[in-house]
Image (cartoon, helix red, strand yellow):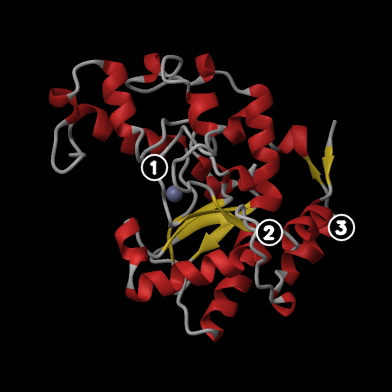
Amino acid sequence: MKFLPLFSLLLLFACGEKSNGESVQHKPAALPVAAVEETTVTEIEVDTVFTIDYITGKFEPAEHPDFTEINPPLSDRKRYLRKDVLAAFTAMRDAAAKDGVTLKVKSATRNFANQKRIWENKWTGETKIEGGKNAAETWKDPKERALTILKWSSMPGTSRHHWGTDIDINAFENDYFAAGRGLKEYNWLTENAAGFGFCQVYTEKNADRPTGYNEEKWHWTYLPVAKQLTQIAEEKMTDDMISGFKGAEVAGEVGMVENFILGINRACL
Ligand SMILES: [Zn+2]
C-alpha cells in the first residue's frame, strides 16, 4: 500500500516553474492553509481511495466523503469538488480578487454518467459539433467520429473531471482569453496559479504535446492530488477497460490512455 504525503507535494509545486522556464510570481501568504492543515494529519491511502472506480468516475460526488459542494459566487451554480481542491481554489480566487481579477468555476466534477450523456449526445448527433454538424451523419466511420469529438470532449471513464481535481474557469473559448478581461485573467493564472498548486492541463499542441485534446486555456488541475491520479491511470488503466457507452469500441484504435489521458502538458505530469 502506498501513502501520499500531500504536504510535501504541495510545497514542491508551490515552488515550481512554468514549463518555459520563466519564474513564477508567488504569494506565500495566500497558500491554501486549510488544505495544508488537513492533509498533514490525514495521509491519503492511495490504493484504497483512488480505486479504478474513482479514476473512471463511477461514484456520486455528492455522497463521497472527500467531496463538497461549490456554490455561487465561487461557481456559476452548485457543483462538486474535492474538499482539498476547493480550499486551494478559494485561496487562489481570493488572491485574484485582490488583484482585480474574478475567477469563477464553470465546470467541476462530472462523473461517468454525466460524461456519458455529453459524449453520447455528440455521438448520436443530438448535440451538434464543429459549427453545427451532426456527427452521426458527417463522420460515419466510428474512429473518425470519435477523433472529431475528442478534440474537445473526453470519452466517459477517461475525463480528469471525474477526479474532482480539475476545474474549468470563466469561459470555454480560447478567444475569450486572447484579449481584454479574459487575457488579464489568463495572464494572472499563468503567473500565479502554480503557487496555489494549479496547472493548465491542455496547452498548445506542439512537439512537447503532440497528442490529446485541443488547447483549453480554461482547464486547470490541482496537481498535489491530480499528479498521483495521473500516475495511477498510467499504471493501471488500459484501453480495453474503457467501455459502457456508444463508440467505446474505438477506444483502443484512438489510443485513449496513451494519447489522451497522458497527452497533457508535461508540467502537469
Ligand atoms: Zn475541463
Front residue of 173 and 32: 173
Q: Of label 3 and label 1, which has the lower sequence position?
A: 3
The answer, for residue 130, to whether it is visible in the render is yes
Name the residue beneath numbered marker 3: 41
Q: Is residue 224 above or below residue 192?
A: above
Name the residue beneath numbered marker 2: 17
Q: Residue at x 46, y 15 (%)?
A: 252
Q: Residue at x 38, y 66 (%)?
A: 76
Q: Amino acid at mark 2?
A: Glu
**Mark 2 closeness class: few <14, some 14–19, many ≥20 residues within 10 Å:** some
Q: Quadrant of residue 130?
A: top left
Q: Amino acid at mark 3?
A: Val
Label 3: state its secondary structure: helix
**Residue 36 percent coordinates (x, y):** 78, 64
Name the residue beneath numbered marker 1: 214
Residue at mark 3: C-beta within 8 A of ligand 1: no
Location of the N terminus by quadrant is: top right
Q: Please state which of the two labelled residues, at mark 2 or mark 1, is closer to the viewer.
A: 2
Q: Please state which of the two labelled residues, at mark 3 or mark 1, is closer to the viewer.
A: 1
Q: Is residue 96 left or right of residue 168?
A: right
